Amino acid sequence: MGEIVTVGLGDRSYRVQVGTGTLPQIGPLCHAVGLGKRAAVVTNPTVGALYLPTVKASLEAAGFGVLEVEIADGEQYKNSDTLNSIYDRLIEGGVTRDGFIVALGGGVVGDMAGYAAATFLRGIPFVQVPTTLLAQVDSSVGGKTGINHPRGKNLIGAFHQPRLVLVDTETLKTLPEREYLAGLAEVVKYGVALDRTFYELLEANTTPLLRRDQDILRTIIARSCAIKAGIVEQDEREGGLRAVLNYGHTLGHAVETLTGYRQYLHGEAVAIGMARAAQLSVAFGYASEADAARVTALLTALNLPVVLPVFPLAQYLDALLKDKKSRDQGLNFVFNRGIGGYTIATVSDLQDLLARCGLGG
Ligand SMILES: NC(=O)c1ccc[n+]([C@@H]2O[C@H](COP(=O)([O-])OP(=O)(O)OC[C@H]3O[C@@H](n4cnc5c(N)ncnc54)[C@H](O)[C@@H]3O)[C@@H](O)[C@H]2O)c1
Ligand SMILES: O=C(O)C(=O)C[C@@H](O)[C@H](O)[C@H](O)COP(=O)(O)O
Ligand SMILES: [Zn+2]
């Protein structure tokens, strides 16, 4: 019972294996993709307590030496101090270019362990074992790795593709409700901006989704990864098209930064950002009021927040200017075109953009 999605990037292509009860296969799968000798498993205390014994046993049974690397749990620790602690442990543990990193956890672990892999010894291989819904549908795929800066989200990072992604939907059974719902926000993103049929599937299945039905989970995770893979294959380094995966993130990242990465989960901030992006899409003539209402209705049905927190306009403006889609001529903003389509347009008057979200003025 499983599905395989391939991310086709020539000799850096890899498989995303989606199944239920797949975690014990990690050792043989690492072996099959030719990874060498020593695995440094990066995880946090929460995920480690639940899944490290299984992952470690499987790696050891397949002949790998295992170094455990524990980092603090939380978005507020996705920073240079934690990254340095990973390097320290890799150096103390004697990890060489024969080694590789296994990121066992959610997007925070995945982004940081991936960035450590991109930079340690100028780059070693890594494997993603995502254990949150958000990481299974989004962050483990596509090779964006990095850390936050106090002034802005993910401002330091690198593109570094994993050698393998292993998704086990069983792990979602232990995920706290709020974290689970936050993952659904990124799933909704694919539907609103890229795939109307997928969006309609989500609308028709809110009850099984909220129940964490394993069949629907395998379906939506594999479909999300396939949609993302299709974009990444065409524009790995975000020259243009890949920015569509940032739908809802301009205001979402601003919300995360302005609240110090503590008040909203990433997916919650993206949900708020998508509701506002849908509203802006109406204001700029790309979508109808009915489309925007539909987006808000689905997010609300999935118990996700949609209200933008109030901060001084100047603070929102500063956050928007630090968006990686910001250029000299303005900000490349991702609008939804109806449901299931998108337009990326340069917006030069950011004050007007924020006013149309009900801020300032
Ligand atoms: N690289 C990308 O393309 C990309 C895409 C989307 C998001 N992100 C990043 O991902 C991060 C958010 O990731 P996240 O939502 O996974 O949050 P997270 O990594 O903080 O994990 C959420 C919480 O769930 C716990 N947890 C993880 N798996 C669990 C399980 N199976 N059972 C019980 N608890 C579990 C974690 O310890 C943590 O407390 C943000 O930093 C965001 O910027 C990156
Ligand atoms: O993979 C991508 O591309 C994305 O934009 C996925 C986003 O969901 C994710 O949050 C990503 O980390 C945002 O990237 P950033 O470049 O805007 O920091
Ligand atoms: Zn995101």
Image (cartoon, rainbow, N blue to C red):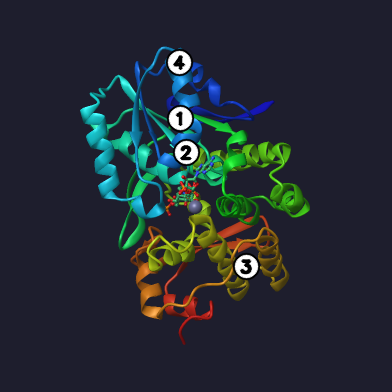
Q: Residue tagged by mark 1? A: 52
Q: Is residue 7 visible?
A: no
Q: Which of marks 3 and 2 is in front?
A: 2
Tell me the SS state at disc 1: helix
Tell which circle, 3 or 2, labels the residue nearer the N-terminal end: 2
- Distance from the alpha carbon under mark 1 to that under mark 3: 47 Å
Residue at screen point 48% across, 66% down: 251
Residue at screen point 21% across, 30% down: 91
- Distance from the alpha carbon under mark 3 to that under mark 4: 48 Å
Where residue 9 sits in the image (x, y, percent)? Answer: 47, 31
Where residue 253 sits in the image (x, y, percent)? Answer: 44, 61
Q: In the rendered structure, which amino acid carries the disc numbered 3?
A: Tyr
Tell which circle, 2 or 1, labels the residue nearer the N-terminal end: 2
- Mark 3 CB within 8 Å of ligand 2: no
Q: In the rendered structure, which amino acid carries the disc numbered 1?
A: Leu
Q: In the rendered structure, which amino acid carries the disc numbered 4?
A: His
Q: Is residue 293 left or right of residue 142?
A: right
- Mark 2 CB within 8 Å of ligand 1: yes
Tell which circle, 1 or 4, labels the residue nearer the N-terminal end: 4
- Distance from the alpha carbon under mark 2 to that under mark 4: 23 Å
Q: Any mark on residue 31, and which?
A: 4
Tell me the SS state at disc 4: helix
Tell which circle, 1 or 3, labels the residue nearer the N-terminal end: 1
